[in-house]
Amino acid sequence: FEHRPGRGKPAIDVDAIVGSRRLRRNRRTDWARRLVRENTLTVDDLIWPIFVVAGENARTPVASMPGVERLTVDQAVRDAERAAKLGIPAIAIFPYTDPALRDPVGSEALNDDNLVCRAVRAIKAEVPNLGIITDVALDPFTSHGHDGLMDGDAILNDETVEQLVRAALVQAEAGADVIGPSDMMDGRVGAIRAGLDAAGFGHVQIMSYAVKYASAFYGPFRDAVGTNKTLIGDKRTYQMDPANTEEALREAEQDIAEGADMIMVKPGMPYLDIVHRLKATFGMPTYAYQVSGEYAMIMGAAERGWIDGERAMVESLLAFKRAGADGVLTYFAPAVAERLKAGA
Ligand code: PBG
């Protein structure tokens, strides 16, 4: 900001254009920038998604997600402890299911000793005050990689909902605090709410993946849970068309009416307009999922030295706050929490 008298008059009279309104005045010093800052990112905004796998004492890197690993349950407990120490409010658990345990109807989702349930129980026993969100969808358990039961090419809605209710009950029984239906079947939020209430889990919250788009940005996640190779076709008959906004409002409205406690938009960065509109329209606790492909883009470019990864991480997360999100599911959660703790 250089607006000082007596330096010789430039050819263009900028004063005549802006008058006394010089927006750069507030940006001149660090303290002033901090004073006028409208949004801040805190550790309370973070939800950390983790991947669990069978076995013991092993951490396997996910190639397409630098810095992310599949964890055996004992290691997941260690990361949960780390999350709690950093002050991260909640984690979200996703399983890599042994392919031998996958079948067309996702039976393993109903096994009360499946990987997710084992991880929930182990983490609850060691880190009781950390929130645990479990994903309710059949894709980690189905041999075809779809989120629902199939009849030929068709994904069956109502039959899938019944299966999802059973899966949610199994997770609640294991100790999940929040059920996160990520399947996009119609009516699943209401059905899960009724199922939970009837089984004495009235306190268990539902974070609905209310607006989930059929996106190219889930690729690395499908590597992590091992569904990329098996997925037949695509998910466009149940996940939303990236071209639509009004439909997102209807999806969210319906999930709220069915009893969702919190709503989520997914992916995140390409859909900040949706986050903003949902928050402005419904005023609900609203979250965004900065998905695997978004994480991979930032990490991949940073690894090549094309962008400053740390700054891009913080900037991307701040963008969610600016759009109105109450929090973000992000694979950056531990890294950004470390930074915030260090006061950076
Ligand atoms: C599936 C599910 C997906 C993600 C979370 N739950 C992928 C999909 O719909 O195929 C993606 C998360 C990410 O990409 O980080 N129910």
Image: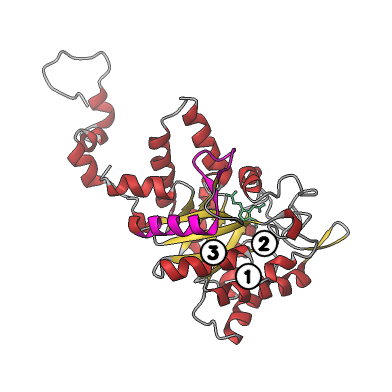
Against 275, residue 177 (above or below) is: below
Can residue 183 be spotted in the picture? yes
Q: Nearer the viewer, mark 1 or mark 2?
A: 1
Query: Quadrant of the rendered structure where residue 87 is?
Result: bottom left
Residue most toward the left? 6
Q: Which colour scheme appears in the figure? A: secondary structure
Q: Secondary structure at mark 1?
A: loop
Q: Which mark is residue 183?
A: 2
Check whether the beta carbons of the residues at disc 3 and disc 1 lie within 8 A of each other.
no
Neighbour tally class for label 1: few under 14, some 14-19, many 20 plus, Cα within 10 Å? some
Q: What residue is at 54 percent from the left and 81 percent from the top? A: 201
Q: Position of residue 90 (x, y in %)?
A: 44, 62
The residue indicated by pointer 3 is: 119
- Between discs 3 and 1, the one toward the N terminus: 1
Query: Quadrant of the rendered structure where residue 250 is?
Result: bottom right
Seen from the viewer's position, the closer of residues 32 and 145 is 145
Q: Is residue 154 left or right of residue 185?
A: right
